[in-house]
Amino acid sequence: MIYADNAATTKMSAAAIQTMVSLMNENYGNPSSLYSLGQKAKETLEDARKTVAEAISADPREIYFTSGGSEADNQAILSAAALGRKNGKTHIVSSAFEHHAVLHTLEKLKSEGFDITLLDVHENGIVRPEEVEAAIRDDTCLVTIMYANNEIGTIQPIPEIGAICRRRGVLFHTDAVQAIGHIPVNTATDQIDMLSASAHKFHGPKGVGFLYARKGIRLTNLIEGGAQERGKRAGTENVPGIAAMATALKEAVANMADSAAAMKKQRDRLITGLKQIPHSALNGDEVRRLPGNVNFCFEGIEGESLLLLLDDKGIQASSGSACTSGSLDPSHVLLAIGRVHDVAHGSLRLSIGDDLTDEETDEIIRSVSEVVTYLRSFSPVWRDLVAGKTKFIL
Ligand SMILES: *Cc1c(COP(=O)(O)O)cnc(C)c1O
């Protein structure tokens, strides 16, 4: 089996599993309890906070543990909106290809009277800083732009956007779920005010993540209750999950350069190989993309069928995000970079790990070529294209 869907979730690292199991067995106290078992859990929790903070050049007091990326996105955006509303500022700038955790939160705010500007991401899948600058108004309370896109892997000009927001006095949040542990992220030099991350995207456990909020930013609670997480996120802390996340993040940061180099090599081999398939195109900028992301459109086929046939050949991939699969709508990300509906339907995302071999890469290329040819052999859309009844786009 070749697992090429690391953007949907990753396999936990052995060290992260080890951390989790040993805590579950031995260090199971409640960090709020005053006796020694509780205090030991509290120490483990605060060590994890330090590790996470260090990984993004933040202060431990700026880290709030959450149930994952979606919760962190919701809390960051709703906090900025609450602050904005208090000051009469109800305009938010974002982009058209954000994750649904961001887009759906913005839709909710829109229904409550906020004005939302979604910036164009252009053909290459990259937001232009000058367009962020131009979109900022006197009543803008937040700019939220993702660090790297989860479908097409394009990396956004975050330091440039951060500098603009800082200069204009507007809060800047970034959904960095796909970036953390994969490419360097520095909240200080990137001038980020709030950032979301999720453990299961960097070989940690599912159901745990964190929100970074710069000192002085007043967060709004999504969950009321006890005084955990500086009173901003109630509920007994998921200590084994949080500690395992810290283990995974420390590992990911330590191995980042080697891991990225290994992935880039296979990524570029895949891109070169898949480009040989006629009427295909890479989605998103070829250079400014995550080391492990490959995303293609193949004209005249359905991505869903492609996925199922690849699964039969032992290859696990995706045709967009795990969140939209199952729905018949084409990916909002591919539409945002200007792919028309028919073309966007025939998409394939391969998000590889750092252990993919040359042989496996070649097997993926061979399998995708075979399946695309097979699907086209009985596709009415393809027949019309070949007959000249409709025009090829790719
Ligand atoms: C996976 C993902 C999320 C959601 O994270 P969860 O921990 O699954 O809630 C948010 N944003 C991006 C970019 C993602 O890839």
Image: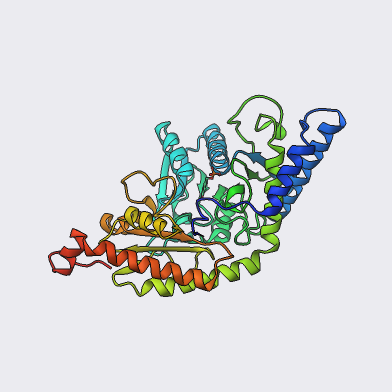
Total count of labels: 0
Residue drawn at the location 54% of the way across and 54% of the way down: 178
Residue drawn at the location 56% of the way across and 51% of the way down: 177
Residue drawn at the location 79% of the way across and 38% of the way down: 26
Q: Of residues 124 and 42, which is closer to you in this image?
A: 42
Q: Is residue 107 left or right of residue 35?
A: left
Q: Quadrant of residue 56?
A: bottom right
Q: Of residues 258 and 358, which is closer to you in this image?
A: 358
Q: Is residue 261 above or below residue 95?
A: below
Residue 196 visible, this angle: no
Q: Is residue 192 above or below residue 297?
A: above
Residue 120 position in % (x across, y down):
39, 55
- Quarter of the image that includes the C terminus: bottom left
Residue 268 position in % (x across, y down):
48, 72
Q: Of residues 127 and 90, which is closer to you in this image?
A: 127
Instruction: Name, please, the residue furthest toward the right.
Output: 36
Q: Is residue 338 left or right of residue 4?
A: left
Residue 284 position in % (x across, y down):
42, 64
Q: Quadrant of residue 223?
A: top right
Residue 352 position in % (x across, y down):
52, 62
Q: Is residue 38 left or right of residue 381?
A: right
Residue drawn at the location 58% of the way across and 54% of the way down: 167
Snapshot colouring: rainbow
